[in-house]
Amino acid sequence: MSFFVLSNCSQKPAYGMIIPDYKWSYEELKSEYKQCRGKGQLISKGEFQGKLTFYFTVMNDSTYIQFRDFLGRRTLYLQLLGNEVYAWDILQDKWFLTTQIQSQYPFLIVLEPTDLTRYFWGIDPQLRRKEYPKDFMFDHKSISISFQTKPDAVGSMVSKAIFQINDNQTQVEIEIEEREYGMSYPRLIRAIPPTILHN
């Protein structure tokens, strides 16, 4: 697999918005705010097309995400706990293993759960610093990843991730539309029912 990361892009601040110059580190954000919440959308183009909205809560190194379809139905619930992913398909009432989720969303092979948690906090996952074995391949597919920043109340934070697979044949975008630091959606912080996990 050929893997490369494109340069970050940024957007101009909204008129009248004052953006702090200070650049937060991941540890500083967690220490200062403890939690973060927000909403956004996941858009797939190419082989798999569709759009889902989502709400999320991040608490330290854990992320909880609830996806909804265009009808507003809860469809998928994700937990990113450390480097593990737990997924509950609410409509079909079944759960998925990490490997099953990766087969549906190939970019998760490169972007680990801890990287996604950093992203939901608004921090660049710093994928450039990672080392991958020379023979690391995913189904002979190439994946490129780029991140965009957007100004908000605490500074210019990462707000959009774009994944392109096989020379733009497939593209997935994860965009954070709103983010609130120091806040959470308590209803998202829950356990997947044991009856589901043991099916």
Image (cartoon, rainbow, N blue to C red):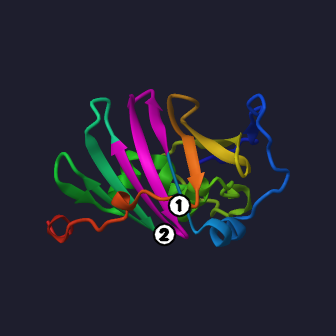
Residue at 36% x, 45% y is: 67
Residue at 29% x, 35% y is: 72
The percent coordinates of residue 37 (x first, y second) are 51, 54
* Most common secondary structure along the magenta stretch: strand
Three-letter amino acid code at the position of disc 1: Glu
Counting other residues with Cα less than 10 Å from the Cα at mark 1, is it few (<14), some (14-19), or many (20 or more)? some
Three-letter amino acid code at the position of disc 2: Asn
Task: Measure how far apart labels 2 and 1 are at the Cα level.
Answer: 7 Å
> According to the image, label 2 marks what residue?
83
Find numbered disc 2 in the image and state the secondary structure of the residue it sits on: loop
Q: Is residue 48 left or right of residue 169?
A: left
State if disc 1 and disc 2 touch (CB < 8 Å).
yes
Residue 138 visible in this rendered orientation of the protein: no
Query: 50 or 70, which is in the foreground?
Result: 70
- Can you tell which quarter of the image residue 118 is in? bottom right
- Picture layout, residue 100 above or below residue 8: below
- The range drawn in magenta is 39-67
> According to the image, label 1 marks what residue?
112
The percent coordinates of residue 168 (x first, y second) are 56, 29
Residue 58 visible in this rendered orientation of the protein: yes
- Can you tell which quarter of the image residue 111 is in? bottom right
